[in-house]
Amino acid sequence: LYIGLLSEYQTNMTDSSGQVFYKFRSSTFATGQNLKHFENAGTSHAITVQIPQRKPDVVVAFKTYSNQNLMYRLTGDFNNVHIEQKLASKLGYEKPILHGLAFLGIAARCVLKTYGGNDADAFKAMNVRFSKPVIPGQTLETEMWLQPGINFSRVIFQTRCKETGQLCITNAFMEIHKDKLTMPSKF
């Protein structure tokens, strides 16, 4: 049982006329002893994704680089938990951890390459939950289940660290525009 504060927020990307092109929804879970008690402040927009009760249709593995955390500092995330062993140990990690953006990008590319022909125009929407940290150099396995739809197809996925067996991305899907859906020919 975790005790803490969950905050959700949404950012819209619009043009000069106000037309919404993208909606970014995000949530943060903060733990700590000094959090004040809050009453329910609204309705959650979190989506629960059910994993199909069958083997994945496709599994794609990707080995991260041992220095990938250093490269991802170029994104502007300068949190030292990604590079300092002392801080990583203090926070309970065996080594500095990989940026979430890094392993999100890996999982998203695995799905888009498999079911969208690696075409950015195939992408419609995505939802993920970061579940566990990843250590640079570990191998990520993205397990995918296709659910065809009328206007778009949804690919349910989860990403597992091969070395630990733990899921690092859960509650995840990517929607692919139906006219851009590609079927993998080899696994």
Image: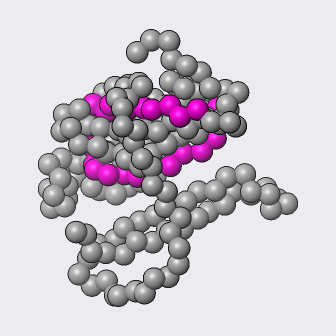
For residue 148, side relative to residue 61 (left or right): right
Q: Residue 17 appears at what percent x and percent y?
A: 85, 60
Q: Quadrant of the N terminus?
A: bottom left
Q: Quadrant of residue 56?
A: top left
Q: Residue 136 appears at what percent x and percent y?
A: 27, 38
For residue 126, side relative to residue 164 (left or right): right
Foreground of the two, 137 or 58: 58
45 up-or-down from 182: above or below: below
Q: What residue lies at 27% left-to-right and 30% top-to-bottom?
A: 139
* Residue 82 appears in the figure: no
Is residue 144 part of the magenta span, yes or no?
yes
Is residue 127 part of the magenta span, yes or no?
yes
Display colour scheme: one colour
Q: Quadrant of residue 103?
A: top left
Foreground of the two, 115 or 50: 50
Foreground of the two, 93 or 54: 54
* Residue 130 appears in the figure: yes
Q: Residue 117 appears at what percent x and percent y?
A: 58, 22
Q: What residue lies at 27% left-to-right and 74% top-to-bottom?
A: 3
Q: Residue 161 appears at what percent x and percent y?
A: 26, 37
Foreground of the two, 135 or 83: 135
Q: What residue lies at 31% left-to-right and 75% top-to-bottom?
A: 4
Prevailing secondary structure of the magenta residues: strand
For residue 181, side relative to residue 160 (left or right): right
Q: Quadrant of the C terminus?
A: top left
Q: Give the range drawn in magenta.
A: 122-148
Residue located farthest toward the right when viewing the structure as drawn: 17
Q: What residue lies at 40% left-to-right and 71% top-to-bottom?
A: 6
